[in-house]
Image (cartoon, rainbow, N blue to C red):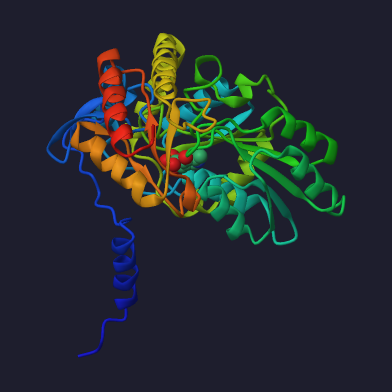
Amino acid sequence: MRSDPLAFLGHELDSLREQKLFRHLRILEDEQRAHTTFDHKSVVNLSSNNYLGLTTHPKLRQRALEAVERYGVGTGSVRTIAGTMDIHMELEQKLAEFKKVEKVVVFQSGFAANAGTVSAILTKEDVVISDELNHASIIDGCRLSRATIKVFPHKDVDAARRLIKALPAEQRKLLITDGVFSMDGDLGALPDLCNVAEETGCIMMVDDAHASGVFGTNGRGTVDHFGVHGRVDIQVGTLSKAVGALGGYVAGNTNLIEFLYHRARPFLFSTSHPPAVVAACMAAVDVLLEEPEIIERLWDNTRFFKEGLQRLGFNTGLSESPITPVIAGEGAKAMELSDRLFARGVFAQGIAYPTVARDKARVRTIVTATHTREDLQYALDAFATVGRDLGLI
Ligand SMILES: Cc1ncc(COP(=O)(O)O)c(C=O)c1O
């Protein structure tokens, strides 16, 4: 019998077990809510990106059901062949109006939007100047493009400028940042980076996955939050987090979007969104416009919880958003913090290397609009007890 050619994967997994970094998937046995059931345990859920509670909003459910009745469950094709329905075009039009741009293209996920866009617009002759903490989908897009990648230290705008100025003026350059950094919850240096892009002729791109529905008027994102409309050439948003369904989109001018229709590989080579998802996303935009009080509740809860953690003495890094890390140090410690919280009925996922630096492992907390004050106080009490037991506070 031949030996297992995948045995090396088992060795890698053994090494994770030894370092206490091997993770089982937690299984959600109910809806994605602020208080729900994972692994047969009722918990306060601080791990979802469901910022506004839209995964279970009645308007989204209703519109998704109606779309299934009217169009069925799938599209049966990629967008460029037979998979563009009228509702795909309606969603893109609606998002373009919402984002105040000429045009939008929707992808199957935020990941596909980032990776598909960067890899489509750049070639190996070009350069990407990228914040060191940018999302994996940006990094993969850069690698696929085969452009030269220059990384600047997190939010160090002067370093970005120096990198750009050292390059030949005629070379095409893309300057790119996350709007909100997903592991630290801080905001990208968008206004200053826009200045650099304008001084040096770079294309400016922002990935607003965690800002979509959270920052800016009615959740329009960081471009709106910072008042830099018209200064960012490519905005990526997600429909998978605050919007409550699934997908990603690119907002920009007509040339950009029509080019992506022709060259973005996830658009060309992967089947389009099912009708229920498209309809739910359209309903979500209506909710953002009609029920902005949900976003206010998100921010009230964010302030309450973040201040609570800080008052207890936890290291919460530089967060400016509903994502608040509780930094524990070594990976094993963060995992123990997460496990002990879970045993007390609080689900906050542990995150370790390679997702974050080896000595900055953490549990990441995400507050939503639908947490009650009781949920949040319960979680703070659990953090206080476990944090003291582990010597973190
Ligand atoms: C910063 C950032 N960009 C992009 C994505 C990808 O978005 P999606 O989940 O819609 O694929 C994520 C999600 O993890 C993210 O955190």
Query: Which residue is situated farthest in the bottom direction here?
Result: 1
* Camera-side residue of 296 and 109: 296
Residue 322 placement, left or right of 151: left
Quarter of the picture holding the C terminus: top left
Whole-percent x, y for residue 153 in the image: 66, 46
Residue 111 placement, left or right of 164: left
Give the residue displayed 66% in from the left and 34% down from the top: 254
* Camera-side residue of 67 and 29: 29
On the image, which quarter does residue 191 sit in? top right
Whole-percent x, y for residue 387 in the image: 33, 33
How many numbered discs, if any?
Answer: 0
Whole-percent x, y for residue 338 in the image: 30, 40
Query: Which residue is situated farthest in the left direction here?
Result: 40
Give the residue displayed 33% in from the left and 40% down from the top: 349
* Camera-side residue of 111 and 44: 44
Q: In the rendered image of this protein, does residue 66 appear above or below residue 5?
A: above
Whole-percent x, y for residue 175 in the image: 70, 43
Whether residue 220 is visible here, answered yes or no, is yes
Give the residue displayed 30% in from the left and 20% down from the top: 376
Quarter of the picture holding the N terminus: bottom left
Whether residue 86 is visible here, answered yes or no, is no
